[in-house]
Image (cartoon, rainbow, N blue to C red):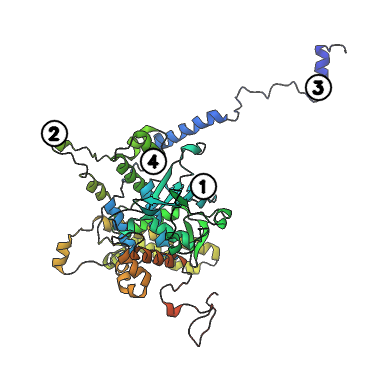
Amino acid sequence: MGRKRTAEEKRRYAEDNGFNDDDTDVDDNPIPRDVLDYTKERYDVQIELWLEGPLKKKLGLSMATRPRTYLTLENYMYIERQLWQSDGHEYVHDGYRVLISAKLKCHVFTSARIGEISEGSTRRGTGKGLRYKDTEMLVAWKDGEPELRYSLKREFAKGMHDKEQQRPTHILYEHVPDQPLIVNPILFMLAIFLAAGAFKKYDTIEQVLAVKPPTDQKYWVLEWADHVHALDLPVFPEMSPDGLTQKIQSASAFCTQVRKLSLRAGMEQPVTVHGIRRESLIQATSNGYSKDELMKFAAHTNQMTMTRDYLSSITVVDGLGGFLKLPLRSDQAEDFRSMTVKRNPELFLSLPAKTQDELRQREDHVAITTKLEDLSFETNAETRTAIRNQLLKQRRMLEKEELNRVRSTQDRAHPAEREGKGKYHVDQDRSWFDRLRHMMPERERLSHALFSISPLRSPEGVSAIKDLLSLLKSNCRVAYQPSLRPRQGKCPVPHCGVDLEQ
């Protein structure tokens, strides 16, 4: 062991290695260190509270909240009737009507959140949502008759990423007695499964409906095809002009479809998917289920969540009947929840001509139009495009604000009053289907069959499934005119013969 160094030797050794004992450049300012993960979580919460509180007041940010809407049974039927009996909207593919109607039923009957069926915005690009591997289909007996049943597991239930056994699984079934076909979820799901070739051993609706449980078993599972599992296909994919794709539909795309559809149905306050879930949970609470069962149905982990965030302020307690000792009622509140969407059958879908002309003469609108015209002198193409897009966005915002203003002041006329006057406002989008329905045989038949009270296995039900399947599988851009469909990939006009695929 060597000799212990003295203090002088240590000082000399440090100087030889570059140590500077001059402390004139040293100050007493603290050096911040990285925030620990545990502290950072609380720090982020405090920042959020500051943003929502003092900062919002200091900057004068809006304190307004979106009004709550509820998709009651009445409002739901308005949307379905608009989609199948009156809608003139042109989707990328008309099979979207089948997907929208089926997905609506999944939300209405299961209370699922938007990100549990579609690809949520927080999981953008992951492809996570309802997939065939999370679902099962079987045929069982119901009152001596075969019944198709479909289970779907909410694999991405909120707050349950590490609680697999707590994620709820919901059952949809075939027998809905004395109800129109439009509310039967299995009708639409069968069309989607057949269009995707999802069944392993069945290719037609007749083959599926012919399956019955064996004599020694109460049920029989309809297995999914191998490619469904191999490709991890979504139940509700996007659609292209050629038909179904293998990419799951995003939550924002479906929300936009529902919002625009509810507007076309005359709802001034558009329905949201959260409004669908809210009404579904309200209905569930009135059916005598225990709190534990309701929490499982809602995929909640806190008992207070239902009361605090979902139950309507419109109470269903019958105070009048209770005080007067009358039979208690529970139907008095639903109409008031239906009223939250402010439905007007004649709701403007676009600006009236007079209002549009007045808007075009306003100074702010004229200024934007003038700037757009002056862009022709801009030589830089990239700059011109950027400025043009910005100006067009500003003009669309003006038009949207004016349309919302006109809608809010629009009168609601009783049907009897309209009949007495002999004329009323009819938007061209609402009259489009009636004028062209003779060119759309599938939609023409579905507009009647879906609203008839028939069992799924009746001739009307089987015919409806085939028409839904036809809408999904059609890959022709001229969907409803057989005489204009390509023949062997060529234009059917004899003297033309152009390759339509190009």
Left or right relative to 36: residue 218: left
Mark 3, other Cα within 10 Å: few <14 / some 14–19 / many ≥20: few
Q: Secondary structure at mark 3?
A: helix
Amino acid type, label 3: Glu
Amino acid type, label 4: Phe
Q: Nearer the viewer, mark 4 or mark 1?
A: 4
Distance Cα–Cα, label 4 vs label 3: 74 Å
Q: Nearer the viewer, residue 330 or 402?
A: 330
Upstream in the sequence, badge 4 or badge 3? 3
Q: Position of residue 186 (x, y in %)?
A: 39, 56
Q: Is residue 257 visible in the rendered structure shown here? A: no
Distance Cα–Cα, label 2 vs label 4: 33 Å
Residue at which label 1 appears? 123
Mark 4, other Cα within 10 Å: few <14 / some 14–19 / many ≥20: some
Amino acid type, label 2: Phe
Q: Secondary structure at mark 4?
A: helix
Disc 1, disc 2: CB below 8 Å?
Answer: no
Upstream in the sequence, badge 1 or badge 2? 1
Residue drawn at x 49%, y 46% is: 122
Quarter of the image that includes the C terminus: bottom right
State the mark number for residue 15: 3
State the mark number for residue 297: 4
Mark 2, other Cα within 10 Å: few <14 / some 14–19 / many ≥20: few
Q: Nearer the viewer, mark 3 or mark 2?
A: 2
Residue drawn at x 44%, y 74% is: 478
Q: Position of residue 378 (x, y in %)?
A: 51, 66
Residue at which label 2 appears? 323
